[in-house]
Amino acid sequence: MSRRVLVIKASPREKGNSSVLANRVMDGAGEVGATTESVSLHRLDIRPCRGCDTCRATHACVIKDDMQGLYPKLLAAEAIVLASPIYWFTFSGGMKTFIDRWYALWNIAKEPFKDKPVGIVLSYGDTDPYTSGCINAIHTFESIFRFLEAPIAGWVYGSAMEIGDVQKNPALLDSARSLGRQLGTA
Ligand SMILES: Cc1cc2nc3c(=O)[nH]c(=O)nc-3n(C[C@H](O)[C@H](O)[C@H](O)COP(=O)(O)O)c2cc1C
């Protein structure tokens, strides 16, 4: 059976740079026979974690919003790609709100991400990964996936400010495609 790759897009710009890179990852995964699905977070109703801790007792999240549909997708996926713009020196608030809700997932399923390969895609307007704040996103993702025992299979990040800028960087687009091929290979 083909590998299931779930791609999460956290930019409200559907034709924006991180989404273009995420689409390239999907192209690469498709080339090696993987099944891909993408989810645009900004289209969904995903409310902030309340920190109520109910999920620790009930193994379910009390917030009845679109995250309920994403929990089974996250569990079923065999590889996950997280794509985000850099906003204010780290990944976007939409991505953070989504990840905060994994607290329940961690209580719904035992070790939900253990050994599940992850790909990270980031774009930023500044010229380098340090001054842009991309480095902060990298550190945070490293901490999250170290805790969840999920291997980060690859990183794709680069400078692109306006919509369309990333198309001028063929090396970056190629690295996104390579990441997809890697994640899509069982
Ligand atoms: C609210 C907001 C905050 C931003 N903050 C940063 C930042 O801290 N560092 C940076 O290099 N670029 C910053 N940018 C620029 C975006 O990271 C850049 O345009 C990126 O490619 C957007 O990705 P997208 O096209 O996928 O939406 C910011 C843009 C917005 C709209």
Image (cartoon, rainbow, N blue to C red):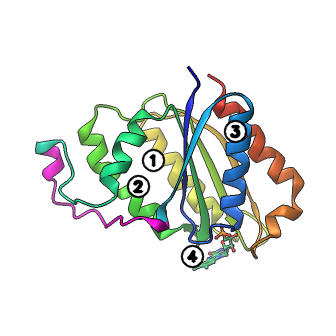
**Looking at the rendering, in which quadrant would you find the C terminus?**
top right
Which residue is the site of mark 4?
88
From the viewer's perspective, is the residue at label 4 or at label 3 nearer?
3
Going from N to C along the chain, the mark reached first, 3 or 2, is 2
Alpha carbon of mark 1 to alpha carbon of mark 4: how far? 19 Å
Quarter of the image holding residue 85? bottom right
Is disc 1 in contact with disc 4, using a CB cutoff of under 8 Å? no
Q: Is residue 37 left or right of residue 97?
A: right
Determine the main secondary structure of the stretch shown in magenta. loop
Alpha carbon of mark 3 to alpha carbon of mark 2: how far? 22 Å
Quarter of the image holding residue 12? bottom right
- Amino acid on which the number 3 mark rests in the picture: Gly
Alpha carbon of mark 4 to alpha carbon of mark 3: how far? 27 Å
From the viewer's perspective, is the residue at label 3 or at label 1 nearer?
3
Which residue is the site of mark 2?
99
Q: Residues within 10 Å of mark 3 (few under 14, many from 20)?
A: many
The percent coordinates of residue 38 (x first, y second) are 55, 50
Q: Secondary structure at mark 1?
A: helix
From the viewer's perspective, is the residue at label 3 or at label 2 nearer?
3
Going from N to C along the chain, the mark reached first, 4 or 2, is 4
Q: Which mark is residue 144?
A: 1
Look at the image and give the residue range highlighted in magenta.
Answer: 42-56
From the viewer's perspective, is the residue at label 2 or at label 1 nearer?
2
Residue placed at 64% from the left, 63% from the top? 134
Is disc 3 in contact with disc 1, using a CB cutoff of under 8 Å? no
